[in-house]
Amino acid sequence: MKSFLFILAIFPFLFSAAQQIVNLDPLSVTSSRLPQKTTETGRSITVLDAKKIQQYPIQSLDDLLKYTTSVEIQQRGPAGSQADIVIRGGTFQQVLVLLDGIKINDPITGHFSAYMPITISQIERIEILRGPAAAIYGSEAVGGVINIISKTFSSFIKEKNSKGNASVAAGEYGYLSANAEFTKTNKRVNYSLAAQTANANGQMLRANNRGYFNNHLFSANAAMKLKKNWRLLFHSSFDSRDFAAQNFYTGFISDTATEKVNTWWNHVKLKHTTYNSSDELDLTYKNTFDQYVFNPKAIANKNKSGLILLQYLHSKTVSAAFFYNYGILAEEKTIQSNDRGNHHNTNIAGFGSFIYKVKKLTLGSGLRLVNDRNYGTAFLPQANLAYRTGIVVFKINAGRAIRSADFTERYNNYNKTIVNSGNIGNPNLNAEKSWSYETGADLVLPNLRISGTVFYRNQDEVIDWTPTPYADMPRKINLAPTGSFALAKNIKKVNTSGIELDINYSRRFNSNQQLYITASATFLHSESSDSIPSFYIISHAKSLLQQTVLYTYKNIGLGITSIYKERKSQEAPGIKALINKNYWLVNAKLDYRFKRFAVFVAVDNIGNIEYSDLLGSRMPGSWTKAGLSVSF
């Protein structure tokens, strides 16, 4: 809180000094699949480029997103072990994550949404869109969209070049990480090979267990020129995570869980471009294997899921004032599980959107017609408007979304012989339906952008886990009568309203000195029609303040991130777990570069505070690391 007020206080001084203008209105493709300046989209969008990402004091992509406006990362463990992504309240299932415009959300559960199959060094930029986008991208785009855009897929470099980089870091509690990337470009082929690993014994948890993790990622992508105007793009990656999962999902003292998640991701794109149009055909296949062991005496839950997605997209620029696209998508989801059983689901959709500019006004609209095996046919409209007058941009947006339950929500613990306690799936869940509305304004000045947004989301049949006594369980065939259960249920009504305030300041003083500051505040309020509170709806922050300072002077770089979170306090006395009403977390990284080398030291949780984002999942205290990197 103090850091947020300090940043606000120093803005007038920063803005008054001599400066070189920095563009704070970058292009974005996420709002409509068509390139637009962010101020023309009528949406709330944040764009993080590769250079900024490298300066953040982070270990993983969920660490990075934690400090992005109105994105709440509810981490269960460090270094990407596991985290839930929440945008504008709601649940972690209501955020769609894309890689190069293609959905990567897993059919098993939204708990895996932060497992992004790309190394940090391969990312060109990340675009975060807040608010609904189901008409453009489909299911899960209720609260927002995170679109990761790779360097290889974003552009084709014609110059012949070969380069690479590598780094290694070590720290307390047996921490050891390394990453390496090699890229090669010529007139016909661009490709990138990368690997990263993060390992630690971890800090002490309850019952003398340690919060260990061993996470590895291997990623390869390529872009090849074929005949004139044709390109073939390919991305394949393998992600392996082995980590302590104690009390990640339950509040039981018998929970000393461990978990292993292996993901194989493949994406092939065939693209044809002309001076005013493009056609893209995408085929993706994702395979995930999850093994969860509740404690050494328990039988492991083994879940194998598959996602096959085929998409065609046509985009055309008719004139400087009119752009449009349309496409069709088909996806097949499958699961084979000793815990959830064997199931499948299909989803087919046709979609389109357009952008029309009239002087100071930009109008965007989209529509999706979708047929899902679980809920039938639905229409999902979207409309947004931006009006610019001088340095002020006014924006309005509205859209509808629908989301079907995933395999965990439908079938968790459904296939076991006997279940003594835990979360129980419900095959009879209805699809979530919601309407979202927002309005706001941006003040755009040289080097400074200030944004304010008010939003409201009206939701029906929201899916969440609710404490339910044995007598009220709809299916008791494998449940112990003395057990303690939470049932996946439809909450009749959930309304969420909020305010976002966002300040971005960037200045390049000269070739040796640059400063980038963001400060954001999000205030949320959710109301549920159910008298018994469900788990994830009450878990989101009521107040969220996020700040970032990135400063470079000659060869020295400094990155500081902080977050203040206020939420409803919770307690689980059986495992001595507590969700405090608020916490303030600060991380920092200092690096020094000389020629092709750089050394750095980073400290997470400088104040050594005790905190948890989700009840029972204790996050680490202060943790120091240091490392060396080299480019060649």
Image: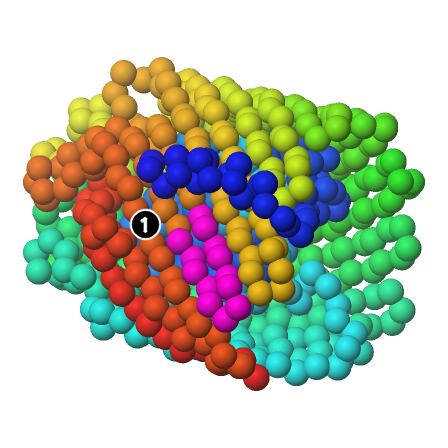
Our reading of the magenta stretch's main secondary structure is strand
- Left or right placement of residue 165 versus residue 350 in this view: left
Position of 601 relative to 103 (above/below): below
In reply to whether residue 549 is colored magenta, the answer given is yes
The picture quadrant where one finds residue 358 is top right
Look at mark 1 in the image and give the residue it sits on.
Answer: 586
Residue depicted at 48% across the width and 25% down the height: 499
Q: Position of residue 26 (x, y in %)?
A: 68, 47
Is residue 529 something that shows in the picture? Answer: yes
Q: Position of residue 255 (x, y in %)?
A: 15, 51
Q: Residue at x 30, y 61 (%)?
A: 603
Q: Quarter of the image for the C terminus: give it.
A: bottom right
Name the image quarter holding the N terminus: top left
Mark 1: amino acid: Val
Looking at the image, which residue is at 66% across and 83% down?
Answer: 162
Residue range of the region highlighted in magenta in the rendering: 548-560
Q: Verify whether residue 578 appears in magenta.
A: no
**Residue 136 x %, y %:** 66, 38
